[in-house]
Amino acid sequence: MTELLSNRPAFGAPGIQPRWTRSDKDGVGTAYSSSSPVWWTVSAGILSEVYYPTIDQPQIRDLQFMITDGETFCHDERRHTKNSIKRLCGDSLGYQIINEDDEGRYRIEKQIISAPHSACVLVHTRFIPSKGWRGKLRLYALLAPHLDGGGWDNTAQLALVNGERILVASHRQRWLALGCTRAFSAASCGYVGVSDGWQDLMSNKLLDWQFNIAADGNVAMIAEIPLENTQEGTEEFVLGLAFSDHLHGATTSLSQSLAIPFQSQVAKFQEQWERACRTTVKLDEVSQDGGRLYRISHSLLLAHEDKRYPGAMIASLSIPWGEAKGDDDLGGYHLVWTRDMVNSALGLLASGNTETPFRALVYLACSQCPDGGFHQNFWVNGEPYWSGIQLDEVAFPILLAWKLHEAKSLREFDPWPMVRAAAGYLIRKGPATPQERWEENSGYSPSTLASNIAALVCAAKFAEDRGEANLARYLHEYADFLESHIEEWTVTTTGTLVEGIRRHFIRIHPIDLNESSPNEDPNSGKLFLKNRAPGLKAVFPAKEIVDAGFLELVRFGIRLPNDPLIEDSLKVVDATLKVETPIGPCWRRYNRDGYGQRADGGPFVGWGQGRAWPLLTGERAHYELTAGRDVKPLLRALESFANSTGLLPEQIWDTADDLELRMQFGRPTGSAMPLMWAHAEYIKLLRSINDGEVFDRIPAVADRYCKRRERIDFEVWKFNRQIQHMRRDRILRIQAQAAFRLRMSTDGWKTQSDRDSTDTGIGVHYIDIPTREYGDSPLQFTFFWVVARRWEKRDFSIELL
């Protein structure tokens, strides 16, 4: 049994404010086995966050070595060595790291993998002192637990297992254990910033404090690894970091993992990954790097699926600007966003993988809210984190269901209940979205409208397949209503950003969702921009803020690539958002964006400066492919934005190198890396090039909107969009969320007529009114609620133009 030592407590409780680490990772790893529920990251040459037992729960801040001669210097790996990293081999997500002292006194070689069938991270280490320093150096392992996703209230403790020292930490029911194939010769537990081992060694280059316990605080623990100081000079051992919900489980997992030869563990680790990647579609030849980033992206997408909740895929194993974040900001990007998740699933589908996208769809169906919507983001157990609503995130699961239907990969699962509920939600809550895809503003967004239109057409096709012809017709007609208003809602006719281009798409036409009769003129709205630095202007004419979200209209097949409005809007986007980096072109999200690394190199904390996103280079490449132009320069740029181990960042530094800030033009900032949305976009781009058409394009959508056909145009009145006037050549559709009888008049209530609503079966009831037959007087109406047996007690009016 494990003996916990509780004498000799550390001083300095509870320690300084806990913080995470930078999110620009150099590596992400896990075993491809559900019996190894641990994920880990590498940054600046050391092990950073490790996640257990689910992919959204980080358990440590970092684990690194400290080196000292006891007299003249003391180093920690992260700050005092130059590091290089490469993947071990094949498709596996294991890494080899070399950290070297600038003065050549020592070299550390590490291989990091997960135990293939255990919740344990293994760090095989070769410590190589130079010839003149053999026998003079001492080596320590320093670990900062952040159990259950937080740095506070952790307890670090020295323990004995079979008479040998190990270090353990706990928080509530969560435990970790740190051990080595060489029994630790000394150890200490302390409070970070006060009595931890880093402070001790840095003060006099000796480990003077040997505390057995540091309870209930921000803690760190340190252990000395005895060196044999042989004539050959190379010291070789394996560190193990194991996790469990019980102390006994952590120590058992640690001991068993260290007892198996490391090379045997590596062989099994690699074999798991090779088996998982064996059936990918061959896309190497259409890439510009021989398929390297393709294979890495595929493995990364697989690695971002949870093992306890199969199908749950998070946005990134990272915490953006984590060095500035503590326990009060638990989310990071290790959460489920349905937009990111569906893109990840579609990226895997493009690679030929149908298993994971299928699990993702079933998981999403089980995560859907009772009203048909989806939370803005949520933990893998389904609990919501942020409370916003984004209509594109409700649409994307429908699109995934349709793509799997087209691939004949739905098996025995019926997505129709999920699709039906989501379609009803889009119609009841839309057309204005509470947030668009940048999660900041409400209103009419071209990208959100594109996803909603495509999703409703797909939902209509599902309804047709199930013999629900009336519902299919209604869904098609509502999609047509949205499509016919795209330009009316989201295109300015008085643009000022580029001389000679007055008409172009805007980022979003802002709408106050509390306003029942919103102003729908895109020339007149005022847009409040979040994340702006204190003192900077934050409110701008909406027509002066642009992004490239309208390209989603082309992606799904709603607009043709050679549409003059699309081409003019791209000219505005390029003049406003395009950045020519030494690596290739990249684009910012929108002008005057404040979400990004600050100008002085500091982290984004409430405000910053929006930077260029490699993802948007991929989106532009998809458009250029549709337009029939050469996409190789954009493909090459996207591949080159990845770091040395093939991780794509969310954002890059988009101005000149600043060595003092350690920022390089075209290289990652401190935002999320890797971003799975970007990796998925890259795989889909390769597949699109290979197939000669955009992978996300939906033929049913393109057939409906890019080919000539007879159509009926609708104008929709609803309680969250009470229009005051409409064109007479459109049919008026009045809809509500309960059965009603409409009483209407066109002569000031001198005469009147009643009509009963039609039930769609998705929480919407409606009446169609052909307005051509009425005169010039306003159309007036009120409601009798059939179930409640009461009148609305107010009248409404629409002017016919």
Image (cartoon, grey):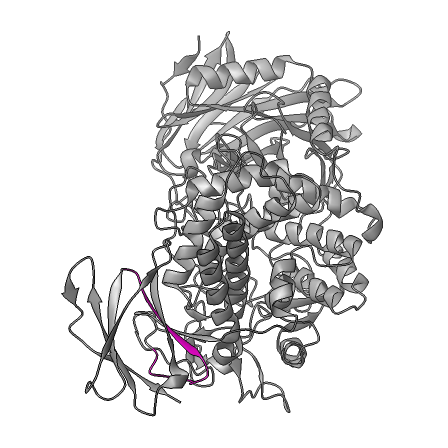
Q: Residue sitting at 63 percent across and 29 percent down?
A: 32
- Magenta segment: 723-738
559 and 242: which is toward the camera: 559
348 and 164: which is toward the camera: 348
Residue 460 percent across, percent down from the top left: 51, 56
Magenta region includes residue 727? yes
> In the image, is residue 634 above or below residue 647?
below
- Quarter-wise, where is residue 75 in the image? top right
786 and 593: which is toward the camera: 786
Magenta region includes residue 610? no
- Quarter-wise, where is residue 629 in the image? bottom right
Q: Is residue 338 visible?
A: yes
Q: Is residue 595 visible?
A: no
Quadrant in which the N terminus is drawn: top left
706 and 770: which is toward the camera: 770
Q: Residue sitting at 58 percent across and 89 percent down?
A: 502
Q: Residue sitting at 48 percent across and 33 percent down?
A: 309
> In the image, is residue 677 above or below residue 732?
above
Residue 387 percent across, percent down from the top left: 36, 54
